[in-house]
Image: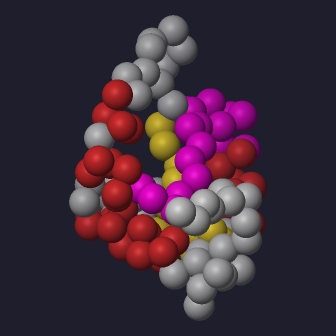
């Protein structure tokens, strides 16, 4: 049985590209999963729970979640805090591709925020 090294460099036609994943719901994560499958480095940005609240990670063990988010790394950021926004802006600056699927009424607001940095 072959083993894989998670530290091994990605191979594929998109190797060398960094994708920042801001997606939610089925279509966005599925799109970004494909980019990861083709070798892109994918960083999923997740909302950080408010201080003092415990986060339920049980859903992460669900096979559907595992399939949808394979080949992705994740970071939890509190984007309501200056430190979280600072990290987020560095991630955007280093990304080759930013994928989002915000609601139409929020998309323009978020897009202008991304373009300003």
57 over 20 or under it: above or below: above
Residue situated in front as seen by the camera: 25 or 79: 25
Find residue 76 and report its horizontal and vertical position in percent: 56, 38
Tell me if I can see residue 53 in this picture: yes
User: What residue sits 68% from the left and 59% below the top?
Assistant: 5
User: What residue sits 36% from the left and 73% below the top?
Assistant: 31
- Indicate the quadrant where residue 96 lies: bottom right
Find residue 103 and report its horizontal and vertical position in percent: 27, 58
55 over 97 or under it: above or below: above
Q: Is residue 28 magenta?
A: no
Tell me if I can see residue 117 in this picture: no
Colour convention of the picture? secondary structure
Find residue 105 and report its horizontal and vertical position in percent: 27, 58
- Indicate the quadrant where residue 68 lies: bottom left
The C terminus - image quarter: bottom right
Residue 93 lies left or right of residue 27; in this view the side is right
Residue 117 lies left or right of residue 111; in this view the side is right
User: What residue sits 49% from the left and 43% below the top?
Assistant: 46
Outermost residue toward the top in this view: 52
Outermost residue toward the front in this view: 1
| Magenta span | 69-86
Find residue 81 and report its horizontal and vertical position in percent: 62, 30
Q: Is residue 78 magenta?
A: yes
User: What residue sits 59% from the left and 43% below the top?
Assistant: 75
- Indicate the quadrant where residue 61 lies: top left
Residue situated in front as seen by the camera: 96 or 102: 96
98 over 70 or under it: above or below: below
Residue situated in front as seen by the camera: 51 or 112: 51
Q: How many marks?
A: 0
């Amino acid at each position: 049985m072959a083993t894989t090294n998670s530290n091994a460099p990605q191979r594929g036609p998109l190797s060398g590209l960094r994708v920042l994943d801001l997606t939610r719901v089925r279509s966005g994560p599925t799109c970004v999963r494909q980019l990861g499958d083709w070798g892109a480095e994918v960083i999923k940005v997740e909302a950080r729970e408010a201080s003092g609240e415990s986060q339920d990670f049980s859903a992460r063990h669900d096979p559907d979640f595992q399939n949808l988010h394979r080949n992705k790394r994740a970071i939890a950021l509190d984007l309501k805090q200056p430190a979280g926004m600072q990290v987020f802006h560095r991630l955007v600056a280093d990304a080759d591709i930013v994928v989002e699927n915000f609601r139409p009424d929020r998309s323009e607001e978020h897009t202008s925020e991304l373009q300003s940095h």
